[in-house]
Image (spheres, helix red, strand yellow):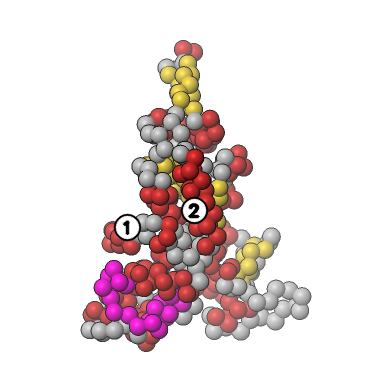
Amino acid sequence: MTEERAMEAALRPKALSDFVGQQTVRRQLSLVLESSRIRGTASDHVLLSGPPGLGKTTLAMIIAAEMNAPLRISSGPAIQHAGDLAAILSSLTEGEVLFVDEIHRMSRPAEELLYMAMEDFRVDVIVGKGAGATSIPLELPPFTLVGATTRAGLLPGPLRDRFGFTGQLEFYSTEELELVLRRSSAMLEMNVASEGFAEIAGRSRGTPRIANRLLRRVRDWALVHRVDQVDRATAAEALEMYEVDERGLDRLDRSVLEALCLRFNGGPVGLSTLAVLVGEETETVETVAEPYLVREGLLARTPRGRVATDQAWRHLGLTPPDRHPDSLSG
Ligand SMILES: Nc1ncnc2c1ncn2[C@@H]1O[C@H](COP(=O)(O)OP(=O)(O)O)[C@@H](O)[C@H]1O
Ligand SMILES: [Mg+2]
């Protein structure tokens, strides 16, 4: 994980103009930031949502950089007591950007403190204990909260409503991922042919983090096998070795589909049962594997549970079961 972290930091675009894809979010955000620059105030609070690896943390850093403002980084799981949050808030400077990653995992009391801070730039600090406790209102300098979440649906309405702008990040197209890879390969001083980029991009599940990770694995493979230029065949052979198939499904994705098809004849199966079967947390299955499988038309979420589509059966090399003509098909 340390190599991944260091690499990620190195490969992160620093300006909005270097950020590949996400045109809608990029345009909207650029307008929000430009307006606050003209008005000379801190920008509205920004919520970024989407599956892991699509660029939420990168965008938070870009927001601070574009606003020429200092950045404070925290996360929902790190803010368990209202006091933790009060300490952070009361030390913010004017215009500072506070990034709270995984904001849906913040504790309830902290969340309520955050409402007032976001809206009125004020917190009530409780001093003392028991009957003698008093609450002292504390003014905060205007700041910008940037929240990131993989599950916008889990955020309570009152919190969601206090963000002036919500950017919903989407999976990237293969062409966009090729651009990400071109940029990264130049920084890694790799020699990759166009079709090599296409091959890696096609296996990257629409996700820049995965594209960069696969690129490093291909680099390792090429280095050890003394390949000067990575072409399509080299990239494919290297990635087969890491069990990333031609559609980008990795071991977790395939075990989700296999559990559905082989153990439950295609479903429907509840999320928690599915998670137990593949030996993962429900949140991992729901936020990491499922969004891509749904987008690829391999899995469907129904009120009665998860269902494998006909395409999923075929992808596993299996014959889809005969079903009633009006039931689900893929
Ligand atoms: N639009 C983009 N353009 C170029 N690189 C990107 C883009 N989005 C993400 N990345 C790369 O992918 C990696 C993961 O991005 P990150 O912002 O950490 O994702 P998230 O916070 O959504 O999980 C980063 O190293 C970054 O270099
Ligand atoms: Mg992140």
Q: Is residue 9 left or right of residue 264?
A: left
Residue 245 magenta: no
Asked if the residue at label 2 sits under 8 Å from ligand 1, the reply is no
Position of the C terminus, as image quadrant, is bottom right
Name the residue carrying label 1. 9
Residue 114 image offset from top left, x and y in percent: 50, 35
Residue 249 at least partly seen: no
Kind of residue at badge 2: Ser
Residue 308, numbered label: none
Q: Residue at x 32, y 76 (%)?
A: 218
Kind of residue at badge 1: Ala
Q: Which segment did they paint magenta?
A: 185-205
Residue 280 image offset from top left, x and y in percent: 47, 60
Q: Residue at x 48, y 19 (%)?
A: 135
Determine the secondary structure under disc 1. Answer: helix
* Residue farthest toward the top in the current orientation of the protein: 132
Q: Residue at x 40, y 84 (%)?
A: 195
Q: Residues within 10 Å of mark 1 (few under 14, many from 20)?
A: few
Between 217 and 54, which is closer to the camera in this rendering?
54
State whether residue 160 is above or below residue 225.
Answer: above
- Counting labels gives 2
State whether residue 100 is above or below residue 275.
Answer: above
Asked if the residue at label 1 sits under 8 Å from ligand 1, the reply is yes
State whether residue 96 is above or below residue 151.
Answer: above
Q: Is residue 5 left or right of residue 307?
A: left
Name the residue carrying label 2. 30
**Which quadrant of the figure has residue 237?**
bottom left
Q: CA distance from mark 1 to mark 2?
A: 22 Å
Residue 193 magenta: yes
Q: Nearer the viewer, mark 1 or mark 2?
A: 2
**Which quadrant of the figure has residue 12?**
bottom left
Determine the secondary structure under disc 2. Answer: helix
